[in-house]
Amino acid sequence: MAARPARAVPPVVLALRRLPNPRLTGLGSGLFAAAVMLVAGGLDRLLFDGSPLVYGLLFLPLSALTALWVRPADLVTAPIVVPIAFAVGLVPIAGGSSGFGGRVMAVVTALAVHAGWLYGGTLVAGLIATVRKVRLMTRRRTTARAAAQAVAQTARPAAHVTAKAATPEATAKAAAVRSAAARATTKAAARRAARKPAE
């Protein structure tokens, strides 16, 4: 049977494999996303006069990277930290009057106005985290099934050998029981034969 030729790997997959693949904790992914979006918001303010389109387009790939780089144990945090990072990055471009209250109101207003980008990035992070979780659970289930099959295959020869080893002993015991029963039957017949002439 001829071996199948190896499938060619798409260039996009090769490029993705060459990218760094860190494993961030939940807190680390939140700090990473917030810092990147804060820098993105500052650059957007300087270069594009705070364009919401540019900010939203930068937010989508960051959401994907955050969900890809968080470690498997903290996958649930990806859709949580991404909206927080979006709000943090809005501070430089939201504007508003001077003072803490004015800044907060400007950020809240910007969140309401640009909710589409916020929902889109959160959806991207949630989908990637869900796919990673499903793949992780499938891999664990497959590994557990393979381990159980290996244990079962190891136990079968051992049980077979044990059964073989126990067979001669069981046969000897059965023969001894049959011999004792035969002797008891012979003795009983001899006693009956001895009693008949006397009668």
Image (cartoon, helix red, strand yellow):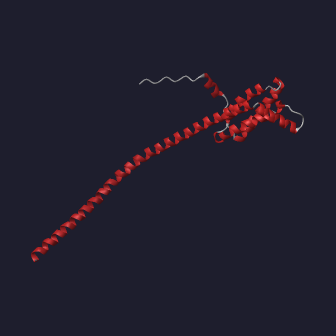
Extreme residue in the right direction: 98
Given residues 136 and 52, the one toward you in this image is 52
Where is the C terminus found, in terms of image quarters? bottom left
Tell me the residue at 41%/46% (across/down): 156
Q: In the picture, residue 63 is in which quadrant?
A: top right
Tell me the residue at 64%/27% (across/down): 16
Number of residue marks: 0
Q: In the figure, is residue 30 to the left or right of 165?
A: right
Where is the N terminus found, in terms of image quarters? top left
Q: Position of residue 141 (x, y in %)?
A: 53, 41
Tell me the residue at 13%/71% (across/down): 193
Extreme residue in the left direction: 197
Q: In the picture, residue 178 is in which quadrant?
A: bottom left
Q: Position of residue 189 (x, y in %)?
A: 16, 68
Q: In the picture, residue 154 is in which quadrant?
A: top left
Given residues 58 and 180, the one toward you in this image is 58
Q: Is residue 178 above or below residue 32?
A: below
Q: Is residue 173 above or below residue 136?
A: below
Q: Position of residue 180 (x, y in %)?
A: 24, 65
